[in-house]
Amino acid sequence: MSVRCVEEWWPQERSTDYRSKPPRANRCAFLVPGAVPKDGCDTLAGWPGERGLRDVGEPTGLQEQPQYSGNRTMNKRALLIGSSFSAAPMLFRLKRRGIHVSVCGSAPSDPCHQYGDASFFVDYSKREALLELVKAEGFDYIVPTCNDYSYMSGAWVADQIGLPGFDRFEVAEKLHTKDGFRGVTNACGTPAPRAIWVRPDEPYALPDSGFPLLVKPVDSFSGRGVTKVEDAASLDAAVRSAMAASRSASAVIENFVEGDLYSHSAYIKGGKVAVDFFVDEFCTVYPYQVNCSNYPSRLPDHVREGVREAMNDLIARLDLVDGLLHTQFISNGRDFWIIECMRRCPGDLYGGLVERSEGIDYTDMFVQPFIGEELRMPDLSAAPRSIGRHTISFAQPLVFQSFSCDFPGSNLEVVPLKNSGESVGVAPFDKLAITFHEYASADQMFTHTPKLHEYVRMKRLDIQQQVGE
């Protein structure tokens, strides 16, 4: 199996003034296809004297993208709401257009602060602070990234001052909070688990479905604070855990449905699904966070059509604007149940899975509506490649030295998120790396994706042995 990696060239440390560059953390934090300066150019993303990512090895199969050379006129200004490695591909899509990109995020060592034109170290979950920043700086665009706080605060700000790409805030609230979304699915008749809402100091009754039940915070993501409850004796503790993980101290209790997990990433244009992608998903370390996935999906056609129909009904009822509508659902191969929908970009470089298979630019499509561009529909491949994605995470904290992956297939790409010698916390709060690779066939993909964690070997520093995940 061939391997691709990246090397970063770090400039000298600069001031930590909130409008300038933060000190560099000496780490290789992300891989961005196409983020390589042109020959003879020592500028990436408009930061003079800075060299960018150097891509080593074979090409990814992506369509070649235009590259920003640092010589364009920056006459538009955008604020990227988020600074993590998952937001980095969006930053470079903006830079290719010659847009002046400021980055908003409270952690100075995050990757996007290292390549933005300016940084604002604010907590963007506090929407009033974000509004004050946007008004003070006069940004032409604001672009959300890969978490609910980014989209929700952005939608509220966009509502106040009229910026493109976002749904009305009242609609965003219905989609991005679990209690609000269950209200929508009930009103629309959308197939979804039955649910009740629990608020602080209020009594609640058990759902009619009986056990098992799933208890969730109404406003968290990445599976945090979720508990499967098998009996009444465990319910109160699960509710308290969910409330503790919720900013509003509220929880939702759902009936537990049996089936396999999938995602549906659809781009809306003109009030309906214009193009979409189905992905098989698996949770093999933490039970409510995806760490293994593949594209294309093995989902039956009749289920795909049912999901599309449900999403088109949702789009019409809520009058959703053009752009991404990302959904997770469970199916037993016959029926399906919608778990959640979101307008933000899914994290852990989800778009890279589709990009490597179809040869399209999923990330650029996500960005387009937020900068006032008409959504452009891609030409899909007649023979998409069979691609697997794996987020390497662990059920116990550890200190790693090195790791290796022996996945079936070829063209392995590794996106490292830690330096050797760093500690790795437990899932769903931390991760070591994200990998992509190509399978030889769809059958090989369907067989091996659910057990990708078994092909990872790691050498730990805190104990003298080699372990898998």
Image (cartoon, rainbow, N blue to C red):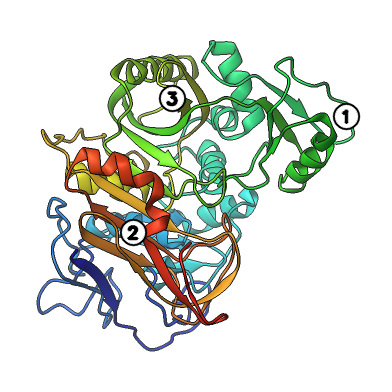
Q: Position of residue 67 (x, y in %)?
A: 17, 62
Secondary structure found at label 2: strand
The answer to which of 302 and 218 lies nearer the viewer is 302
Q: Residue at x 43, y 68 (%)?
A: 417
Going by the numbered disc 1, the residue's amino acid type is: Glu
Residue 202 circle label = 1
Q: Residue at x 57, y 54 (%)?
A: 428
Residue 192, position as x, y percentages in the image: 55, 20
Residue 420 visible from this viewpoint = yes
Task: Give the residue at mark 2.
Answer: 435
Q: CA distance from mark 1 to mark 3?
A: 33 Å
User: Which mark sits nearer the N-terminus, 1 or 3?
Assistant: 1
The amino acid at mark 2 is Thr
Locate residue 275 relative to residue 197 in the image: left or right: left
- Residue 363 appears in view: no
Q: Residue at 51% of width from left, 15% of height from top?
A: 190
Earlier sequence position, callout 1 versus callout 2: 1
At label 2, counting other C-alpha atoms closer than 10 Å, the crowd grade (few under 14, some 14-19, many 20 or more) is many
Q: Is residue 419 left or right of residue 135?
A: left
Alpha carbon distance from label 1 to label 2: 45 Å
Residue drawn at x 51%, y 53% is 134
**Residue farthest to the front?**
465
Q: Residue furthest bottom?
A: 12
Label 3 to label 2, Cα distance in Å? 33 Å
Give coordinates of residue 281: x percent, y percent: 41, 40
Whether pointer 1 and pointer 2 mark residues with C-beta atoms closer than 8 Å, the reply is no
Q: Residues within 10 Å of mark 1 (few under 14, many from 20)?
A: few
Q: Nearer the viewer, mark 1 or mark 2?
A: 2
